[in-house]
């Protein structure tokens, strides 16, 4: 699972992030209808309803057997982990894991 953050999208870097993920994994899933995690920087800590509402479609899209997700934002990863049922980490963890083989 790969979450393309609002920053990735606003800066036009989503294709580069997706390409990097695809170089590290044989299957990369970008959930549909999850364009923003709703964490809004750190606002999701104070107003968790924003994050919860934005991620309603996420959990149903996590395939059986999938146990990890990746993003490029620590705050996004907090909310994504909370509402997806899987652990999200920074994409660099996957890059490091693959490059260490």
Image (cartoon, grey):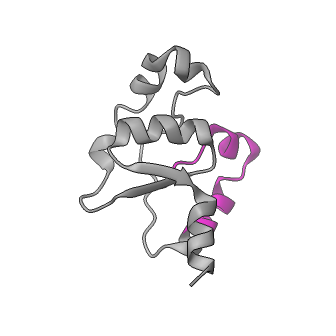
Spot occupied by residue 21 in the image (x, y as percentages of width and height): 57, 66
In this view, 22 is above or below 48: below
Q: Which of the two residues, 62 or 10, is positioned nearer the viewer here?
A: 62
Determine if residue 50 is in view.
yes
Res. 58 visible in picture:
no
* Residue at 41% over, 57% down: 68
* Residue at the bottom extreme of this rendering: 101
Give the quarter of the image for residue 20: bottom right
Image position, residue 66 (x, y; %): 32, 60
Q: Nearer the viewer, residue 44 or 20?
A: 44
Give how far across and how far down residue 41 sits, in percent: 65, 27
Q: Which quadrant would the N terminus be assigned to in this image? A: bottom left
Q: Is residue 34 left or right of residue 13?
A: left
* Residue depicted at x 61% and y 41%: 74
Image quarter where the C terminus lies is: bottom right
Look at the magenta stretch and give its main secondary structure: helix
Q: Quadrant of residue 39?
A: top right
Q: Residue at left 63%, top 43%?
A: 73
Magenta residue check for 10: yes
Q: Is residue 5 left or right of residue 33?
A: right
Q: Residue furthest right?
A: 11
Q: Residue 100: x percent and y percent?
A: 61, 80
Start and end of the magenta stretch?
1-21
Q: Does the magenta portion include 75? A: no
Q: Does 5 sit above or below residue 66?
A: above
């Amino acid at each position: 699972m790969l979450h393309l953050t609002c920053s990735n999208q606003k800066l036009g870097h989503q294709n580069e992030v997706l390409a990097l993920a695809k170089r590290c994994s044989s299957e990369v899933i970008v959930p549909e209808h999850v364009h923003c995690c709703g964490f809004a920087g750190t606002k999701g800590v104070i107003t968790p309803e924003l994050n919860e509402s934005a991620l309603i479609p996420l959990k149903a899209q996590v395939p059986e057997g999938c146990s990890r997700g990746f993003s490029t934002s620590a705050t996004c990863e907090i909310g994504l982990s909370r509402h997806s049922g899987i652990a999200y980490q920074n994409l660099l963890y996957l890059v490091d894991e693959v490059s260490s083989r």
